[in-house]
């Protein structure tokens, strides 16, 4: 099975980020709609079909808004803003659209490495995808 590994599901709101041209925008509804459409277009109903690929969204859970517009710097965002704003494209991509995988972000959120944070794990977010907290 082939995989398309460059589908940004992040919001970008800081033009200083050097890779801002790779993202879909800053509005959560707009980005969520585009992510769902791209995942469906890439995977179709059978990602293993010869004319399809698995969709891999990047960079979970949030690589932006980063400090000073520097890629790889810490993300300073509260729990409420993370869940209500920044995770909605991920819900769209992993929810009904059914993206198969993700690239992990390398940053920290409020000083905690995202890979070490139980509240930022994909399993936790997937389990909560049907809840209003998403």
Image: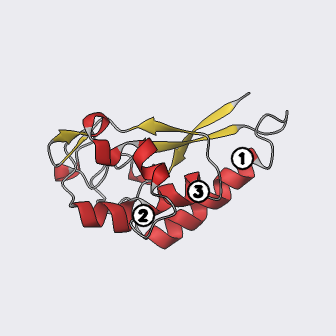
Which numbered circle lies on residue 95? 3
Tags 2 and 1 in contact by the CB under 8 Å rule? no
Q: CA distance from mark 1 to mark 3?
A: 15 Å
Instruction: Please identify, in this view, whether the residue under mark 2 or under mark 1 is nearer the observer.
Output: 2
Residue at the top extreme? 1
Q: Is 17 drawn above or below residue 89 in the view shown?
A: above
Q: CA distance from mark 2 to mark 3?
A: 11 Å
Q: Residue at x 51, y 58 (%)?
A: 91
Crowdedness near tag 2: few (<14), some (14–19) or many (≥20) residues, C-alpha within 10 Å:
some
Which numbered circle lies on residue 42? 1
Q: Earlier in the sequence, mark 1 or mark 3?
A: 1
Q: Earlier in the sequence, mark 2 or mark 3?
A: 3
Residue 129 spot, x, y in % from top left: 49, 59
Figure disc tally = 3
Q: Residue at x 80, y 42 (%)?
A: 46
Q: Is 58 drawn above or below residue 134 in the view shown?
A: above
Q: CA distance from mark 2 to mark 1?
A: 24 Å
Q: Residue at x 65, y 51 (%)?
A: 39
Residue 93 spot, x, y in % from top left: 57, 54
Crowdedness near tag 1: few (<14), some (14–19) or many (≥20) residues, C-alpha within 10 Å:
many
Crowdedness near tag 3: few (<14), some (14–19) or many (≥20) residues, C-alpha within 10 Å:
some
- Asked whether residue 24 appears in the rendered view, the answer is no
| Quadrant of the image containing the C terminus | bottom left
Q: Earlier in the sequence, mark 2 or mark 1?
A: 1
Q: Is 80 drawn above or below residue 94 in the view shown?
A: below
Tags 1 and 3 in contact by the CB under 8 Å rule? no
Which numbered circle lies on residue 134? 2
Q: Residue at x 20, y 61 (%)?
A: 78
Instruction: Please identify, in this view, whether the residue under mark 1 or under mark 3 is nearer the observer.
Output: 3
């Amino acid at each position: 099975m082939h995989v398309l590994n460059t589908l940004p599901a992040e919001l970008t709101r800081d033009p200083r980020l050097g890779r801002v041209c790779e993202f879909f925008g800053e509005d959560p509804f707009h980005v969520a709609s585009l992510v769902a459409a791209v995942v469906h277009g890439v995977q179709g109903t059978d990602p293993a079909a010869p004319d399809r690929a698995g969709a891999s969204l990047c960079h979970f859970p949030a690589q932006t808004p980063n400090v000073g517009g520097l890629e790889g710097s810490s993300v300073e965002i509260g729990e409420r803003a993370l869940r209500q704003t920044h995770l909605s494209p991920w819900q769209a991509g992993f929810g009904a659209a059914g993206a198969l995988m993700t690239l992990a972000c390398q940053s920290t959120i409020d000083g905690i490495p995202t890979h070490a944070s139980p509240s930022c794990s994909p399993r936790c977010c997937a389990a909560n995808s049907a809840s209003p907290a998403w």
